[in-house]
Image (cartoon, coloured by chain):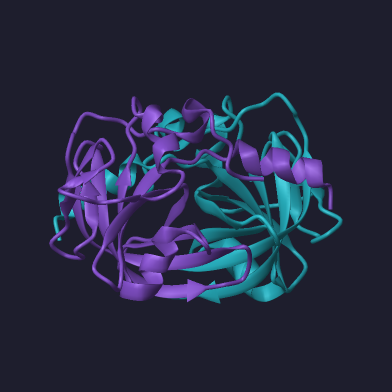
Chain colours: A purple, B cyan
Amino acid sequence: MDAAAKKHALRLVPYGLYLAGSRHADGHTSVSLVSWFTQTSFDPPLVVLGMHKEGEAYKGVQETGVLALSLLGAGQKDLVKPFFKHVAVADGKAGPLTAKMGAATGCPLLTDLPASVELKVRQVLELGDHATVVLEVVDAHVHHKDMKALDHASAGLHYAG
Amino acid sequence: MDAAAKKHALRLVPYGLYLAGSRHADGHTSVSLVSWFTQTSFDPPLVVLGMHKEGEAYKGVQETGVLALSLLGAGQKDLVKPFFKHVAVADGKAGPLTAKMGAATGCPLLTDLPASVELKVRQVLELGDHATVVLEVVDAHVHHKDMKALDHASAGLHYAG
């Protein structure tokens, strides 16, 4: 294995950035950053996330089987760092952002971001240092129709390799 | 479910584009387009693909358990359409491109593209209209170090929603 070539190749891949809203067994909700995402089916609409096993979002997935993802917008790179560690939702806010609970999942949606999807877990695989989680999109919400998505390169982030 | 919101949200997601090189039970090799990709682990290095169940690349995965992906470069959008359907490799070429067999997998690598990864299948899930395939990166090759990756938006493609 050429480790340097692996890093180079895998860091070429374009990725978006997402704020994951998780709901937990004790009723609290949190928001944290996730970046490994792809769709894997149109019907039913399925997506896959690579989730850090020690992360708050993955704990929520294991505890309640639901999650919401809000896509960060092209101009929102300053929102990346504050959510490297999770931020608890309190009084309708997650740090500087407005958080509204999604009707389908009870998970926090960030309405300052372009759009959100609400998700239910379909399958979890623990094959590596992150879990591979397959989820079904059960509802979606557009908050700001004209906003484009942020990507890793624009955010100065390289979480891959 | 708000279907229009789902389409809007899922089409905001940045994606790259890949030429999948597959090897088949009868020994032939082929090249076809794939676009749903994410990494899901650093150690071991795992990636996930959403693969059309009727596609040539998925047939190869089922038949031989190996695959190669070459990332399309930023200036290579004219290479997308010719590989919507698969192209058989013959005399070291896949259509207009040079194809070289990877030592780790025997799958075709497109050396005119920026980089390739060679992959071994770890798990296959058939939960929707595309299969969710988890693969381990077993080798990687950089062909053109300064080339960036093509994305859906630059290619005028919207395969999501």
User: Residue A137: in sight, yes or no?
Assistant: yes
Locate residue A24 relative to residue A13 in the image: left or right.
left
Locate residue B57 relative to residue A84 in the image: left or right.
right
Q: What residue is shown at x 76% (from left), y 38% (from top)? A: B111
B50 w.r.t. B158: above or below: below
Q: Position of residue B58 (x, y in %)?
A: 57, 66
Q: What residue is shown at x 47% (from left), y 29% (from top)? A: A155
Determine which quarter of the picture holds residue B26. bottom right
A43 w.r.t. B83: above or below: below
User: Residue B130: in sight, yes or no?
Assistant: no
Q: For the image shown, how many numbered marks are present on the structure?
A: 0
Q: Position of residue B151 (x, y in %)?
A: 49, 35
Q: Quadrant of the C terminus of chain A?
A: top right
> Which of these two is toward me, B16 or A79?
A79
> Which of these two is toward me, A48 or B79?
A48
Q: Position of residue B9 (x, y in %)?
A: 27, 46
Q: What residue is shown at x 84% (from left), y 47% (from top)? A: A2
> Which of these two is toward me, A111 or B8?
A111
In the current view of this chain or complex, which residue is farthest to the right? Answer: B103
